[in-house]
Amino acid sequence: MKIIRTTFMLMALLLAAAGSNACKKCPDCPDTGFPCIKIDPVSLTFGNVEAGAEASQEIVVKNTGSGTLTILSVTSSDPAFTGSFAVSAIPPDQEAVVTVRFSPALAKGYSGVLTINSDAVCSQARTVALTGIGRGQTTTPLFSSSLETASTGDPERPDGWWQDFWGISGSNVTFTYLNEGHTGSRSVKVEVSGEPLHPHSGRFPQGDAKWLFEPAELTPGDYVYTNWYRSDVSTYVTLAITNKEGGTEYYDLPEAPASTGWTKYEAVFDVPANGVAATVLHMLKSNGYLITDDHQIAPYYYKGFNKGLLTITFDDGWNINTETALPVMNRYGFKSVQYYRTDAIQDYAGFQYPEPKSLIQIFKDAGHEFGSHSVNHSDLTLEPDADLTKELADSKTFLENYLDITIKHFATPFGLYDSRVTKEAMKHYSSQRTVDRGYNSRDKLDLTRLKTWCILINTTDTEFEAWVRKATEENLWLILLYHEIEGTNGKDDATLEMFTRHMRIINEYGIEVVTMSEALEKLADYL
């Protein structure tokens, strides 16, 4: 408070000394001896912050005049937002920082205005729009099953639970309703033995076995699924969404590594606009056992970074994108990441493609980034170890020699990966981008499994704008995935008209568009 009283006294003295000069009309401040002010940004979005916690961001204040600029006070219209400055006197052509803190007390949305008062000529008070969302510290699960209650019709299974397997022999599968658990006295076990396995992946060639619960009714939004499990092999988890039409959409969630002691599994997922219910399938895809207990689904709120980021990526390296997508991105100054499968470059004649070097060079000259998409675009989870290494290492080496650059990033073909693929990929690259749905956030930033929103021909503008809006408002890192952009398209990929609208939406929201390397540099403090 002492500083504030002093600065207000200083403001009065300065205004008295400046006299009529305080209102002098000089938009570019050309006169000698007068300070002018410029602030960046002019709005801050804090996203989700737990009630009782605090998040901070910075505003850069620059003196664009020729006299010393003095910050007199920083005030806020809402006490949830506060501002402070370490340096009050800013010499000409120098900058200082105003730190803005958001401290929500309640679980609700907040908005306010920060006012920066100074002795700048023409514009003594500058304002910054502020928004943030306070979230409750605890969230009540919408679905919870500790498996304690047996079905009245079948005491060998929990109420609301079922046994299921496919693609493997039923004589090799055993389901057990155990009299022990992580909490309470019950859990479920599935075990498979004697089933033929794929020679390289160690999994069944096709098929799985699992316990599953009846779909829980959910509204569109973000959720977190958790359970506690024990297993002697790596196990797999898939989200099954029931849509309004009665169909089922399946999305892979992260793999659960083997653990013979009770281990908590957690994965974030979303229910799309047409979703009405969800179940989560924790599965055995190899010989071994899996025991689970304490399954829950609860609402989830991402924790954002200091600002939202957006990365535009393309897979495969389609030649036509030089003619279609690149001019649209150039219009807005956007840079993308181009992930190439290298067999199509090395044998372009066999693929009946034009010579690609000059077309790729156009992207390089425009400042775009490049990454590997393997050599042959195969299912890497089924490759033997030696071939897996070649797919990852040889594509990197070829692109580096071909383009005379360093390749740091990898995108999984078909979005298929497992712990073996990931381990090998991270020996050669700094990141692995998947096709797993979702946003990358401060609390869920995993460079081995960067999440993505894939754009297809049936992606609506409403869906796309919602992704961009959420990333902008909640300060998330949104990665977009495109393939071939054509003027008219009979395939599943986006058309040029769609892509043009998408780039316009991104520009209108003002979210910062960055390459993969730029994003990792900006988020280094969170890694």
Image (spheres, grey):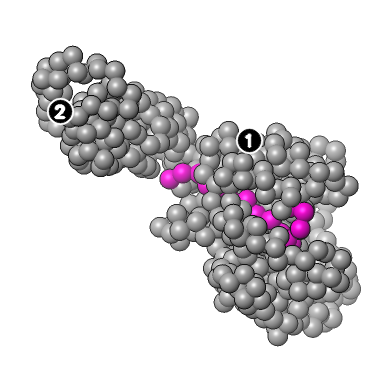
Give, as a three-letter code, the residue at label 1. Ile
Q: Label 2: state its secondary structure.
A: helix
Label 1, residues with CA under 10 Å away: few <14, some 14-19, many ≥20:
some
Q: Are marks 2 and 1 in contact (CB under 8 Å)?
A: no
Give how far across and how far down residue 123 sits, in percent: 29, 22
Q: Is residue 451 above or below residue 204?
A: above
* Residue that numbered label 2 is attached to: 7
Q: Earlier in the sequence, mark 2 or mark 1?
A: 2
Q: Label 1: state its secondary structure.
A: helix
Give how far across and how far down residue 91 sits, in percent: 20, 39
Query: Does the magenta run of residues contain 320?
Result: yes
Give how far across and how far down residue 120 sits, in percent: 24, 26
Could you tell me which residue is drawn at 29 percent across and 18 percent down?
Answer: 25
- As drawn, the label of residue 35 is none
Q: Is residue 172 above or below residue 526?
A: below
Q: Nearer the viewer, residue 382 or 246?
A: 382
Give, as a three-letter code, the residue at label 2. Thr
Region in magenta: 306-321
* Residue that numbered label 1 is attached to: 505
Give how far across and how far down residue 506 sits, in percent: 60, 39
For this orientation, the residue located farthest to the bottom is 386
Quadrant assignment, res 184: bottom right
